[in-house]
Image: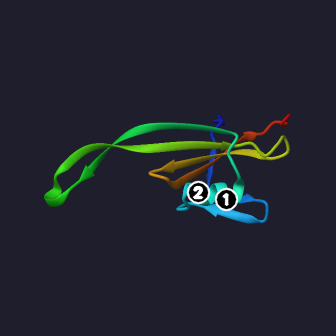
Amino acid sequence: MLAMVSSQTFALRCGSKLVGLGDRKHEVIRICGEPSFTDSFDEPIVAYGYGGYQQRVTQRVDVWTYNFGQNRFMQELVFEGGVLRRINRLGYGYRKN
């Protein structure tokens, strides 16, 4: 049985340039422009301090979706703490008005 899932990639081509894991949000905007959609949320994480002390904190997660039109796949970029951590290929895009 086949499952419909997004596939993860490590770089995204925008024009003649690439953005990749580890890039910051301002670099992605400079290369790819503004995303079609954005979403943000705070994700709880456990941070370890001096001496192994555990502290529950939150980390900002930003999810950007780029629609490159009906002949290309849409791309979902996930930033954690302002750094690009995942690039997911979604289904085909749609025609922009």
State if disc 2 and disc 1 touch (CB < 8 Å): yes
- Residue type of the residue flagged with mark 2: His
Mark sitting on residue 47: none
Please provide percent x and percent y for residue 50.
17, 60
Please provide percent x and percent y for residue 76.
63, 45
* Residue wearing tag 2: 26
Q: Is residue 65 shown above or below 84?
A: above
Mark sitting on residue 30: 1
Name the quadrant of the C terminus: top right
Tell me if I can see residue 12 in this picture: no
- Which residue occupies the foreground of this view, 57 or 11? 57
Q: Given the current orientation, which residue lies at the most extreme bottom position?
A: 17
Q: Is residue 83 shown above or below 41?
A: below
Crowding near the residue tagged with mark 2, few <14, some 14–19, many ≥20 C-alpha atoms within 10 Å? few
- Residue 26 image-quadrant placement: bottom right
User: At x 44% / y 51%, what residue is drawn?
Assistant: 81
Tell me if I can see residue 84 in this picture: yes
User: At x 60% / y 38%, what residue is drawn?
Assistant: 38
- Which residue occupies the foreground of this view, 29 or 67? 29
Please provide percent x and percent y for residue 84.
54, 55
Label 1, secondary structure: give it: helix
- Is 78 left or right of 7, judged from the image as shown? left
